[in-house]
Image (cartoon, helix red, strand yellow):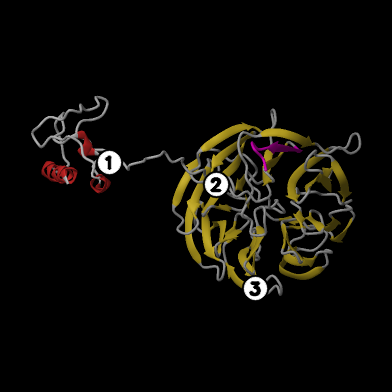
Amino acid sequence: MAATRRAVNLLDQARHCRWVVRTAIPCYAAPALRFTTWLILLGLSAGATGCGRTSDVRPDPGQPPGVAELQSPRSTPVAPPVPPAPPCADDGWTTYGHDAARTSASGSCLFAPLRPSWSFSPHWVRGTASHATRTVVGGDAVYVTGGIGPTPTLWRLDPATGEVVWTYVTMADATRDGWPTITSTKVMLVDDGVYSVDSITGKGHRGELDAWGESLTDGERLYAENDRYWDGYGLYVSAFDLEARLLWRRDYDALVRFFTAPDVGGVALDDGRLVHAAQHGALHSTALSAFDPVSGDRVWKAEVAPQSSPSIAGGRVFGIEHWRGEASDRLVARTLAEGVLVWSHEVDRARGPAPLLAAGLVVVHARDGVLAFEQGSGAAVWSAPLARTAQAVQSATTMAAATGSGTLVVVSGSDLHVLALADGRETWTGPAAPHARRVEGPVIAGGALYVVADGVVVRFEGAGGE
């Protein structure tokens, strides 16, 4: 009973002191600092002094005066939670812009620093200049396009060593640096013709002659554009089966023979819409249109002058457009369903490649730097002062994202830059190749980066690769 009475007295003293002390010596005893209900239940008490009396316990000179610290009876340190590993998905890079929607964003991870692991420089016969131009990756193979002299050529490489597995020579005579497209069994190429090549054996054939432009697949069909009219068909967007046989053709224009359109248009596919950015110069077929990919029926058409390949995400189409009467180009977002304008921003010289779409951002590489905007509102998010030095054509890409690690690779001059996708902060930089003059076409797959430097494919291994 006496112990209980002493505990009750402690309660009264604590209430009078109001738990606020501003003097060097507290007005209540040290045991009252750690007072909790369990003391009463156990009947424990300690000698204490009331308000205005001095405690036998002196304060720790290392602690600020008058700060009460309440603790549990048995406090044990708790280790901080271990952050989960990034969700790294090895989804390859199977066509221009990574996928049919042209997001230029892989689910893979890429961690800096990067180190070169192998390179591939095409060689054929002595005295014939050969070069690589574009790289795609799918499954256990790397596919490279380029030229043996002017002849479009396709190579399959071993991804671990860079050794050649097979070579397919088209026997055509005018390469234009086309990107290949991989299906489950075929490698398709639209470069001075439409070609279907068996991915295992390297045997293939041509479906039609004189076609140059982007291509993509939905797994059953090949969709392609032609932006050069020489000896074959005129300008168009078409659908083929995977044996390169024509299914339908739209936006056809054969008015001017030997016409080469500005190489800034392209095609993108998502959510049942095939979008064609037809940049045919002064010809009437210049427009941005959407088609039903099965029937080829036109769904909508915007009378604008596209200045980039399109990309699609979240029910919207993104691209660079030039509007009549304006001096500058615009980055534009339109609805995929109807082509209605959602927002636009003036940008300076970002023509050519499709805008990159990742982490809710739309990112373009302009003349003076990289610009990132919100996909939904168009609000500016960040910028990075890395000049675009590649050609202003759709095929000469300079950016690739790895969403698993939240990183963005940017090519500027002869250097590679790794940025944080969220805020544009640079985390690493290094040369693509010694004294390289032309570096472009970054591709991320399987924890590695592939670029083409002066006609040579270079593979970089990321730190802690998958």
Residue for badge 2: 84
Indicate the secondary structure of the residue bearing disc 1: loop
Q: Amino acid at mark 2?
A: Pro
Q: Which mark is residue 205?
A: none
Residue at x-position 80% and y-position 36%: 121
| Residue 253 is a magenta residue | no
Q: Earlier in the sequence, mark 2 or mark 1?
A: 1
Q: Residues within 10 Å of mark 1 (few under 14, many from 20)?
A: few
* Relative depth, front residue between 318 and 381: 381
Give the residues drawn in magenta, as a range. 455-466
Residue 217 in sight here: yes
Q: CA distance from mark 1 to mark 3?
A: 71 Å
Kind of residue indicated by mark 1: Leu
Asked if the magenta segment contains residue 460, the reply would be yes
Q: Are marks 2 and 1 in contact (CB under 8 Å)?
A: no
Q: CA distance from mark 2 to mark 1?
A: 33 Å
Question: Of the residues shown, which amino acid type is indicated by label 3?
Answer: Arg
Q: Is residue 313 left or right of residue 440?
A: left
Image coords of residue 43 (percent x, y)? 23, 45
Quadrant of the rendered image containing residue 182:
bottom right
On the image, the x and y values in percent for residue 310 come to 61, 58
Residue 280 visible in image: no
Circle 3 Cα neighbour tier, 10 Å, few/some/many (<14 / 14–19 / ≥20): some
Query: Marks 2 and 3: which is nearer the front?
Result: 2
Name the residue furthest top. 61
Return the residue at label 1.
70
Quickly name the residue at label 3: 298
